[in-house]
Image (cartoon, grey):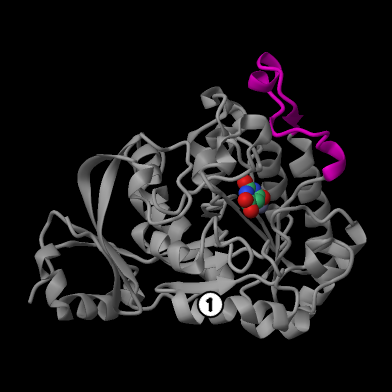
Amino acid sequence: MDLKANFCIPKEYQEAIFLDFLKKDKLKQFNNQNYTILPGFCDVHVHFREPGFSYKETIFTGAKAAAHGGYSAVCTMPNLKPVPDSYENLKIQLDIINRDSCINIYPYGSISVDEKGKNLSNMEELKPYVCAFSDDGCGLQETSLMKEAMEKAKELDMLIVAHCEDNSLLKGGYIHDGEYARKHNHLGICSKSEYIQIERDCNLAKVTGAKYHVCHISTKESVDIIRNAKKDGINVTCETAPHYLILDESFLQEDGKWKMNPPLRSSEDREALIEGIIDGTIDMIATDHAPHSIEEKSKGLKSSPFGIVGIENSFQVLYTYLVKTNIISFEKLMELLVVNPRKRFNIPLGKDYSIWDLNVNTIIDSNSFLSKGKITPFDGMKVFGEIETMVVNSNICYFNEK
Ligand code: DOR
Ligand code: ZN
């Protein structure tokens, strides 16, 4: 049989995925020009909340949500209970993944014991089971501990992944320290609280030779620092998230759905991030999928927890607002969602692909999410694209039963 669907799979995987697609009778209906076949996306930054906070999300619901978004691989952040700082603690998550996940999940190990920032986790013991080390959710305040972590990571040939945030500069802030905060009397989070730690860590990565990756960058200064560090030959990569590229503080309203950490910054920051995407300073886009209950997120900007969901609409949002607007090419989007994250985190692409109708015009509807988390500022936005099916490891793990 001939392939008639649009096929956007990287060369080296084309044959395996092509044969897998043609073998599946249930997918024959998609073999025409209305449909596009894409490689499984890879999200290096998600919060699936298990063990510890299964009322917000479980590995089962998080994996279903990922499949619904076109993702076949995700890396789960360690701000859990217990924190995966030893094999014993990590094993709880590994067992749930084995039992409940329909996609490929690669957990992080924490950098410090209980993410307290005082002592190093058992990195050596964790190494065979984790994708990298991170204390995401909070910044590592102690320079000496970050240096020790990088030295150990270098020895183990592992990646340090940093949530950069200097607590001494926060002063109770919860949205960007900018125009909206001033006008509406909110406490602001300054840009420096992010970029000062990126600057510190780039220097440490230079000294130690460690592989270093920065989480969810949101400021123009962060882009400049990483651009210069790369020029300087430092082994650094970084991610940003869809909301920092498409939204900024001018969108803010008095509603917890606009609250995440780092916060939505100014339009100049947003433009600098887009520049960073275009010139390759920013290597990948991750969602920071951070589900909380509807009740928790209903407490406004000041009192809601930080975090929004993202994994079920990131592709449509990026396709609509960056590709359809000619800001980046479709190939570039695939580099950001598939090629670069897999390369940096060493995550293979198997028989993992999604099938989309990219011509459909839809409205993002959080009621249709498979995640337990429903809160996102993109809810109600018009986007292009509807997913028909997701295949992971040759198994159909999402199918749109219209
Ligand atoms: O918005 C956020 N939510 N930022 C973080 O750093 C943590 C995350 C969460 O765990 O909810
Ligand atoms: Zn974070």
**Residue 307 in picture, x, y percent from top left:** 59, 45
Compared across the picture, whether 349 is left or right of 49 comes to: left
Q: Quadrant of the N terminus?
A: bottom left
Q: Position of residue 230 (x, y in %)?
A: 68, 55
Q: Residue furthest top?
A: 183
Q: Write the start and end of the magenta stretch as one range.
A: 167-190
Residue 400 point in image, percent of width and height: 22, 59
Q: Quadrant of residue 323?
A: top left
Residue appearing at x 19%, y 60% in the figure: 401
Residue identifier under label 1: 96
Q: Nearer the viewer, residue 187 or 382?
A: 187
Q: Is residue 47 magenta?
A: no
Q: Is residue 118 above or below residue 122?
A: above
Label 1: how many residues lie within 10 Å, few (<14), some (14-19) or many (20+)?
some
Instruction: Left or right? Give the position of 145 relative to 227.
Output: right
Q: Is residue 52 left or right of residue 139?
A: left
Residue 182 among magenta residues: yes
Q: Amino acid at mark 1?
A: Ile
- Indicate left or right for 153 with 398 as reference: right
